[in-house]
Structures are given as structure tokens and as C-alpha cells.
Amino acid sequence: MILFAGLRLPGKSASCRPEIWLAAYHDRAATGKQREASFDAFSSREPGPLRSKTLWYVDPMIRSFLTVSTGTLASRLLGFARDSLIAALLGTGAVADAFLAAFQLVNVVRRLLSEGALNAALIPAWLRVRDRDGEAAASAFAGRVLGTVSAALIVISIGIAVAMPLIIMIIAPGFVGSPTLDLAVQNARLMLPYLAFAGPVTVLMGLLNAQGRFALTAFSPLLFNIALIATIAALLLWHADASSAAWMLAATVGIAGLLQLLMLVSQRSAHLATPLRARFDKEMRGFFAKAIPGMIASSGPQWLMVAGAIIASATPSAVSWLYFANRLIELPLGIVGVAMGTVLVPELTRAVGGGDRDAVAHAESRALELATGLALPATLGLAVLAEPIVRLLFEHGAFGAEDSTATAHALMWLALGLPAHVLIKAQSPAFFARSDTMAPLLATAKGFMVAIALAVLLGHFFGASGIAASIAAGAWSSALSLLRRGTREFGFSVDAAARKRLPRIVLAAAAMGALLWLTTGLMPVEAHGLIRFVALGLQITAGIAVYGLLLQFLGVVALREAVNALKRPA
């Protein structure tokens, strides 16, 4: 397997030339000198026998990152289409608040199990069993995990269905005493079958990721959004009333989970987990003791949104405003965060297990650069362009201009927490690779409490915007707590190249944000939707172009050679 890729500046020494280079773990018996020889040969511009033999070492991790990010981007874009249709179908009243509160509960479960969360526990454990006892033992271990997770989730789903009124009262106390509570309970119960399907889906996806098969797991979540979009489109054409539409849409959630499972099974991924057994033996108890804290910690952004919803449920439409604003935050967070959890955890696990400190430093540094380089411009872009983006995406049908304004204000505050969320995603794999899931869990719990405490205060004075600011503060609390813990326990490794490039990335992002801010006054506010779409698209494209050119001008990336390296055969 291959560890990671870095960019080096042109015309310099071998340590800073613009090649994408890699730490190779394919040959476990290779010595450090042999790996150095491979790097030197790959870096050399002169042809040679060793270079020709090592061409396939090129950037599998960058390719994997791009594959996962592309799949996540496609899923998020379909999610925007889905949520835009939901806004048009349900608006922001009591029915919408009830549906979105229940749907948010399902989203927490999705993040708990999927999108890189279970990878944090399953992949290191599966790799240890495979390396120690062989493929057959690893397959048997996976079969026990798959069977146990599936059985446990069926039982848990039944228990949640019975206790659903109490659960909704906890996560949305403002619904108590109103018809919204009954609507939310009904919707949540209709969505519950998804929970039973999500368990086996996640285990199979984690096993595929552990073997470097990222494409199927990256694109299979598209089925979830496709099923919901098809249902919403039919309901809009049918002109169904809001309550009936919400129930039908809730029922479709479970069907979407079944479709995703059937697709994975049809690709023969189930043979990775055989024989299938449900066992709560000592090994499984030990696995879940590590898995559950890691799964909760990996879902930190969703728990913070739950914290916000608990307070927002007392304000009409506030749950809906926060939900739609958060959907825009999840696009960049998903692209970076999911790819970090899916690709970086297995590679760091191998590096830590092999005792290769240089490989660990290289992976952590490149991950931090990628996270900063993608998250910071997204933060500034969403904060500056919040209102035109919200109006374009959601202001249709039952979603009015006042809803757009309130959602945009919430988005501006939520965007300030995006770098913290991504920082957590970049730091957490370093703990997961060392089988430490408690530190990220404690950091998540701290952020949750901070968000709750501040939301009570700020929500009282500033409404949904104050709650959004509290969620951002909770994210920064978690990120700083995790950073202090990691620095104290094992020290995060940031190499010289990263220390040189990170300030330049910040400078380029700041310049892009200034450009967007200066051009906001030129946007046609009252024009036709198509004109606003074109104008906003041009503004975003210009911002991205300026950002990319500044990165190249400042020496952060050498675009041509990076593209050429990605085109080399793997």
C-alpha cells in the first residue's frame, strides 16, 4: 500500500521539487534505505530501471482521496437538490420542523455508522487480525462484526420505536404540548428501518475501504438521495398535502437504506465477512468498547447540531433554518472529512504500526494542508455569499424570503465553525490509528456541553443566529481540546514543508474572500433565478480561479506537474 503524496517546488533540490512522491508500504520487508532508494529513483527526472519499476507507486492515496471526495461531492450535490425540493414541498412550518427533527435523528445515525466513522474502529482492528492471523481469520472476524452489528441494530431499532416519544421530547423539548411532537414521532418511526439496513452497509463499506476499494463505497450513498429525490418529485407533481407528503417521504428513507445494501451485496462484497455469526464474546465486546466511542466522536458535527436543535425547538421554524444552513456546511465538511476518515485512517494505522515516524509526519502534514486548503476558502465563501446561495437553492414554493434571510444569517455563523470541524477530522485519525477513541469522544462531549450552554444564552437574545454561533463555538472547543491532548501525548508531526505552505494557503484564501466580498454589490438581487444562478456561478468560479492562481504563484502547488502525476498509471 502507498501512504501519501506531497507537492514540492520546481527548480529546487530533490527535497523540494514539484513531484508527487509517496511513502511505500507495499513491501513490508523493505528497509528504510530501500524505500529511500525508491523515492530517489521516483524523484529523478532521468529514466532508469528502478524508476520504471516504481511508476505504479504514484499517489494511490491522493487518487483514493479524490475518488472518495468526488463521490461525497456528488452525494452532497444530490443532497442539495433533495433539500431544495423538501423546502419547496414542506416549507418551514410545524410539519417541516417535525420531519426535519426526525430526519436529523436519522442523519446522526448515518454519521455514527457511515461516512468514515466506523472505519475509525473497524479498519485498525481488521488489519491487526489480518496481519497477525491471516486472511481467513480476518474474514471470520469481519463476519462476527457484521452479524453482531446487524442483530444489535434490529434490537435497538425496536427499542427506539417504543421509546420514540421520549427521544423526541429530549432532542426537541420545544415540541412538547404541541401537535408537532406527534408528527415528529410518526415520521421518526417510519424512518427507523433505515437503522437496521445501515449497520451491515457500513461494515461492508469499511471492509472495502480497508482493502483500498474506495470507488464503490464512495458512490453507493448516491442511492439514498436518488430515492428521496424521486419520491419528492412525485409528491410535488401529485400536489400532496404537507402531512401526507412528510409521511411518505419518511417511509422512503428506509427503502433507500435497503437499496444501498442490495447494491453492495450484488457486488459480492459480503464474501469479505464469512462465516456470518452474531457473537457477543470477549473479542466482540472489546471491539465495541473501542468502536462506540470512536463512532460517537466521528459524528461530532451532527451532535452539535442536535445540541442546537434542542434549544431551537422552542422557536417556530428555527429547527428548519438551522437544518438548511447546516446542509451547506456539510458540503465542504463532507468532501474533506469523509475522505480523511476513509483514506487516512488505514494509511496512518499502517504507518504507526510499522513505527515509521517519517511516514506518519508526512501523512499528517499533507492531511493538514489538504484540510486547510479546502476548508478555509469554503468558510470565507459561505460566510460572504450566504444570502445569495440560500436564496438560489431554497427560496421556492413554501420557503419564503424571510426564511432565506434567517437561514443565511445562521449559515454565516455556522461557517465560522467549519475550520474547527475539519481540524477535528484531520486530527482524529492520529488517535484512531493508535486505538485511542476516548480522546476524540471526550473532546466531542466537551464541545456538546459548550454548545448547549451558549445556545441557552445566545439563543434567548439572538434566536437561530445565536444558536448557530454557539454550535461554531462548540466546534472550536472540541478542536482545541483535541489539539492540546494530541500535542501532549504523542505530538502532531508537522514537517517543514507544511509550516512553509500553511501561511501561504491562509493568505491566498484571504485574498479570495476579499474578492468575493468586493463583488457582492455587483450581484443582481432581484433578477430572474437563471440570471442569479449564472451571476453567482461566475462569482464563485472567479473566486476559485483567483485562489488557485495565488496558490501557484505563492509556490504552494505546481499545477501542471501535479496533474501530470495524477495521470500516471497507478
Image: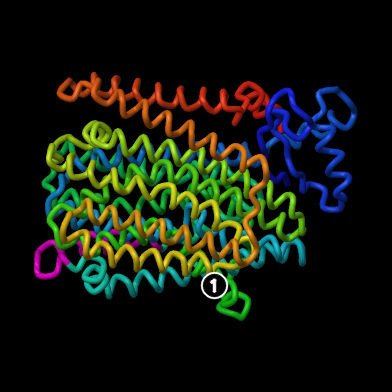
Q: Is residue 370 left or right of residue 297?
A: right
Could you tell me if residue 481 is visible in this image? yes
Identify the image quadrant of residue 111: bottom left
Q: Nearer the viewer, residue 221 or 334?
A: 334
Q: Secondary structure at mark 1?
A: helix
**Magenta stretch: residue 96 in it?**
no
Identify the image quadrant of the C terminus: top right
**Magenta stretch: residue 184 in it?**
yes
What percent of the width, then of the height, locates residue 52? 84, 28
State the residue position of label 1: 288
Q: Is residue 279 left or right of residue 452?
A: right
**Which residue is painted at 67% across and 37% down in the image?**
6
Give above or below for 487 relative to 364: below
Which contiguous range is marked in magenta? Answer: 174-195
**Which residue is painted at 52% across and 43% down in the image?**
371
**Which residue is painted at 49% across and 48% down in the image?**
337
Disc 1 marks which amino acid? Phe
Q: Is residue 448 left or right of residue 362?
A: left
Could you tell me if residue 247 is visible in this image? no
How crowded pointer 1 is (Cα within 10 Å; few <14, some 14-19, many 20+) is rated as: some
Identify the image quadrant of residue 165: bottom left
Q: Nearer the viewer, residue 275 or 181?
A: 181
Give above or below for 550 relative to 222: above
Q: Nearer the viewer, residue 457 or 223?
A: 457
